[in-house]
Image (spheres, rainbow, N blue to C red):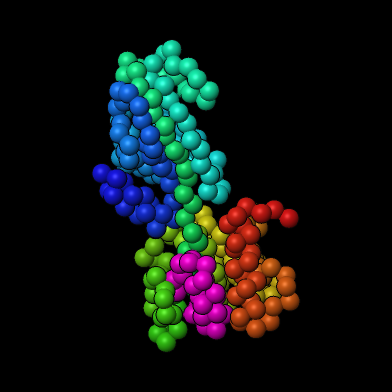
Amino acid sequence: MTARVMRWALSELEKNSKVAIASVVSTSGSVPGKVGARLAISETGINGTIGGAGLEMIVSKSLNEMLIDATKPIGKVEVFGLNKGAKGYEVRPLDSLCGGRVTVAMEVLIPMPHILLMGGGHCAKAIAEACIPLDWNYSVQDSRAEYATIEGAKETHHSCPSDFLESESQESLSRFSDILLLGHDWKEDEERLIGLLKMNFKGRLGVIGSKSKWKAFSEIAIQNGISQESLDAVTCPIGLEIGAESPEEIAIAVLAQIMKDFKGIND
């Protein structure tokens, strides 16, 4: 069962979903769950068990609370006494007839970034190469066959922007933590931007380009029914201000900004 729970947890992380896991690490006396029992909860489901009854109900509540609040990996350990009169330092008594004691480790796993590079040119390739030592996933979409494949990409999409967007939904796009618009063609990036905002993409959205380019994009987006609030959530130009010029320097600036947001670091 442990392997099944862990496989499920990994599949949820692949979908860019946080996962909270409870593991029974030690027991004494009569208890409902044995050492190694695991319970995993994500924003969309639950898998496994630590024995059921009141213990599982209390632990499930704790996992859900941790899941809601966590912006980075967190964890805690709790000791439960399975009877009303359980006493002792850091022992949490439960209304149970089992009479034993259970130590449960709880942790929240945060998915690593998965970046969709929409436009597979020089900057996209440099960003992809910079992702490798970080163990971040990246995928690529481009209307040009020769740029729609980057070595190591998790997904490759050779398609025009409209075809790609029509094949996706808000839910399916949630597998990407970040989408970067890096296209060679102004009109393609414009189409991508408006399409993604109309689909209400929930991740981080960034656009490569100048402030004048963004001003033009914003005007067209508003004409197409996009709210100013949605536009304000987009980052353009992408990347921390470090004077980046070459594709490799831009890649460092972009990934540094994503890491800053990923780790919840405020200015």
Of residues 39 and 148, the one nearer the viewer is 39
Q: Is residue 246 visible to us here?
A: yes
State which quadrant residue 46 falls in: top left
State which quadrant residue 169 falls in: bottom left
Residue 139 is covered by the magenta coloring: yes
- The part of the chain drawn in magenta is 119-140
Q: Work out which residue is located at the far left of the displayed protein and give it.
A: 1
The percent coordinates of residue 188 (x first, y second) are 52, 76
Relative to 231, say whether 22 is above or below. above
Q: Work out which residue is located at the far top of the displayed protein and give it.
A: 85
Task: Locate residue 68 relative to residue 9 in the image: left or right.
Answer: right
Residue at 31% x, 52% y is 7
Q: Work out which residue is located at the far bottom of the displayed protein and give it.
A: 146
Relative to 155, say whether 105 is above or below. above
The percent coordinates of residue 102 (x first, y second) are 39, 29
Task: Locate residue 145 relative to residue 187 in the image: left or right.
Answer: left
Identify the image quadrant of the N terminus. Answer: top left
The percent coordinates of residue 252 (x first, y second) are 62, 73
Residue at 55% x, 84% y is 122
Residue at 53% x, 44% y is 74
Residue 59 is covered by the magenta coloring: no
Residue at 45% x, 84% y is 147
Of residues 249 and 170, the one nearer the viewer is 249
Q: Is residue 68 visible to us here?
A: no
Relative to 172, say whether 94 is above or below. above
The percent coordinates of residue 64 (x first, y second) are 46, 36
